[in-house]
Image (cartoon, grey):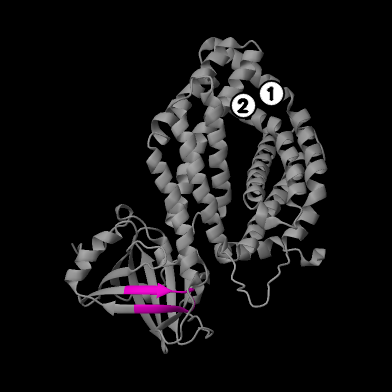
Amino acid sequence: MTADATLTADEVNRLLPGVLLRPAVEGARIVTLHWLLQLQQARGEWSHALQDGELLSSAPEDRHREAVAALHRARVALRRLRASCKEHRDLLQGSHVRRALRSLDRLQRATNVARDADVQHDWLEAESDSLPAEAREQANGARARLSEGVDVRRRRVSVAMRRHLDPIVERFAEDLSGYRTTVRVGESAAQLAFADHLATRLEAGVTRVREELDALGALDAEALPAALHHLRIQLKRQRAVLAPHTTAHAAIGAWYSMATRGQDLLGAMRDAAVLAAQARYESSDALAYALDGVALAHQEAFLGGWAADHELVARAQMAAAAALRTLSAAQREPAVESLPMEFERKYLLSACPPEAAGVSPTEIAQGWIPGTTLRERLRHAIAPDGRERFTRTIKLGPAQARIEIEEDTERALFEALWPMTVSARIAKRRHVVRHGDRRWEIDVFLDRELVLAEVELTQEHETAEVPAWLAPYVIRDVTGEPAYLNAVMARPATEVPHPLPPPV
């Protein structure tokens, strides 16, 4: 493979939205390459902030902030790249992942000091006024000492990037851009989807996180900080592998947000404890005492809040894993020509076009009955003339060409089934505009800032010319993006304003 065959950042960005549905070995490479390129970009921003090694101690304040921001972005990309390499190591064979990990581990250790110093300086600057007089005086002294060492730390980071990152980027990117596989004649060539691989990794993480949470209650004050730090690493790794997929399904985004809150509390506790230890080493006892109190407050907030309900945490993780498997199953079902088929294109819009807004809408409430392979959709619609329609629908296959089995149902049956959809509903107004022989459906969602346009076709590879009245509002074609499937966007009933009189 040559450098010309290495995927570019634009190519990776185009592949990323559909990565969950690709074979696991491809998905692992796309995501890992994404973070490698993000790290490389942040590394360039870092070099620009330093401007050929000029001393930051004599540079304007905005240069300091630019350097701090660049290092933060590099650290985020580095952390997620390392997590991707470790979580997907078995899928990255042949890409020199172990050699790259050794270099990345060295880079992280080399940047830890600069990162900690930046955090400590910012905390002291923001919080010193709220400290008691003696602690405030010691904080000002500590902040001055941190400022004095900024140039040394920056130079060390630059050396580390040149030594540990620059030599591996080109080769690692080239290795990640392709792979070889062997299929035995007569055997199935079906491959595990990346979504299923991630679900398996997440399910294994559920057990680890639950065990660590359960063990916290038996630990004494001396052993507790180390256990919390280890739990924080678990949450960081899960967040890192899910970060590109938070919009693919509401359950994935919900667990990512929950894990973020937990990690933030533990991170704040750790930062305060590290700074307290440094203050104690410098005999700044008043400052150390104040920081011990800050660390303890964050610890109590975590234990008494985030970690109080272990089952809630486990359910959120399992829901995210189930969502990944649902996404995979929905795309895995083969199309059968003898069954009713739906062919459509879907477009993300910047707003509802005036031509559509002027058409009286149909009010729609939809909900999905839980399931892994089969998810039945219930719909209650009220047309502009007041007629009501209740339907039950099952769809299987990819969005652009899928089996669609739909039937009208009686109100009584709908009302009996509707409560089962409480965990997954959407509400929207549909404006239908006819253009030639096409029927364009413009959906304005009521629970988020989102407008989509759909048009049904007669066959899979048929093209649809976007009308002139719609074209200025089209952002892009999202037909193949799982994040824009209605079933994926569904939210718990408490988050969805119902546009219709409740059916029950």
Quarter that holds the C terminus:
bottom left
Report the side of 381 relative to 267 (left or right). left
* Res. 13 in view: no
Q: Residue 47: horizontal and vertical position, in percent?
A: 77, 43
The extreme bottom residue here reads 437
Residue 219, compared with residue 138, is above or below; it is below
Query: Mark 1, residues whose alpha carbon is within 10 Å: few (<14), some, or many (≥20)?
Result: some
Residue 62, compared with residue 135, is above or below; it is below
Q: Residue 199: horizontal and vertical position, in percent?
A: 51, 55
Residue indicated by mark 1? 146
Quarter that holds the N terminus:
bottom right
Q: Residue 95: horizontal and vertical position, in percent?
A: 75, 56
Query: Mark 2, residues whose alpha carbon is within 10 Å: few (<14), some, or many (≥20)?
Result: many
Residue 222, compared with residue 245, is above or below; it is above
Residue under the image location 29 percent in, 73 percent down: 392
- Sequence-wise first label, 2 or 1: 2
Report the side of 279 relative to 352 (left or right). right
- Please give the label number shown on residue 120: 2
Q: Within the magenta stretch, is there residue 71? A: no
The stretch of residues the image draws in magenta is: 393-405
Q: Front-most of 438 and 469?
A: 438
